[in-house]
Image: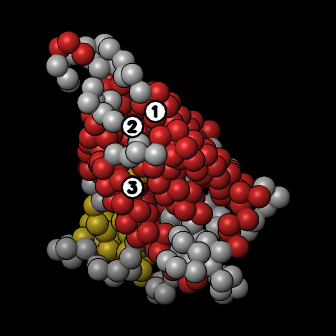
Amino acid sequence: MKHYEVEILDAKTKDKLCFLDKVEPNATIGEIKSMFHKSHPQWYPARQSIRLDPKGKSLKDEDVLQHLPVGTTATFYFRDLGAQISWVTVFLTEYTGPLVIYLMFYFRVPFIYASKYDFTTSKHWVVHLACMCHSFHYVKRLLETLFVHRFSHGTMPLRNIFKNCTYYWGFAAWMAYYINHPLYTPPIYGEQQIRLALIIFLFCQIGNFSIHIALRNLRPPGSKTRKIPYPTKNPFTWIFLLVSCPNYTYELGSWLGFTLMTQCLPVAFFTLVGFVQMTVWAKGKHRSYLKEFRDYPPLRSPILPFIL
């Protein structure tokens, strides 16, 4: 059995960082990262991006050396991805913030509104309903992070947590300030509007959870296997017939319901920004599905059936 010689160069300077002799042909990129880590302890595997070309895409950890377009002396290029943090930690931090921040405004802790309103409650029942819905949404997200989601990538750059928390925490504070404000006025169409909004919100929350369960069941524990998601016996998953990322579709529906319920401009703006971002993610995932699976259902759209 022939062995490989592997040299790893810095993608920016082209300086040689490491030379590995007698590497097994069935060694994976993940194993090569571990070997590289032994000679450079400051760059743990999750921090490494190993590429065939200095400006190319990162190779996957499961890629096998002998299946790559390299000779018996293989040259790879290394980029430092920076300090990493686990996705679970990121999500828990992102979602705990809005939950706590919103409740601070709901209970009107001191220094938010005028002192005479400290620890008072709103006279409008929709404000209490909105707090329950907002809290339910983020408690659901926290529980899904802990018990449902399976992440294909274990870590993400540490710097992202600051950007993501600014987004989630900032919008939560902005929305909560106005919804729980002593001068807040209920929706113009009253109880009918609120009840319709609540139905939309709860329907989409159940739908979003159903999709997350369906996606989880596609990937066995500890596996990075990717499959085409299809509808199951659960009616909430039938939207897979028309949409590649129905979890985003339901997420959008939930926030539209919350916007209708509170009739609050900051909530509407948060929904719009979220829709734009989820559309970007959905389009990327849709393109990935089309590229990876030749038999991918042609009728599906990224996020909105027949539209987008």
Structural crowding at the residue carrying mark 3, measured as other residues with C-alpha within 10 Å and reported as few (<14), some (14–19) or many (≥20):
many
Counting every numbered tag in the picture gives 3
Q: Which residue is mark 2?
A: 186
Relative height, residue 21 to residue 89 (above, below): below
Classify 10 Å Cα crowding around label 2: few (below 14), some (14-19), many (20 and above).
some
Please give the name of the residue rendered at 38% of the width and 80% of the height, measured from the top-left corner.
Answer: 52
Residue 64 seen from this side = no
x and y percentages locating residue 206 in the rendered image? 65, 47
* Kind of residue sitting beneath label 2: Pro
Which amino acid, mark 3?
Thr
Pick the front one: 199 or 213: 199
Q: Quadrant of residue 47?
A: bottom left
Q: CA distance from mark 3 to mark 2?
A: 19 Å
Q: Are marks 1 and 2 in contact (CB under 8 Å)?
A: yes
Q: Secondary structure at mark 2?
A: loop
Give the Cα separation between the discs numbered 1 and 2.
Answer: 7 Å
- The first of marks 1 and 2 along the sequence is 1
Residue pictured at 57% horizontal, 57% vertical? 250
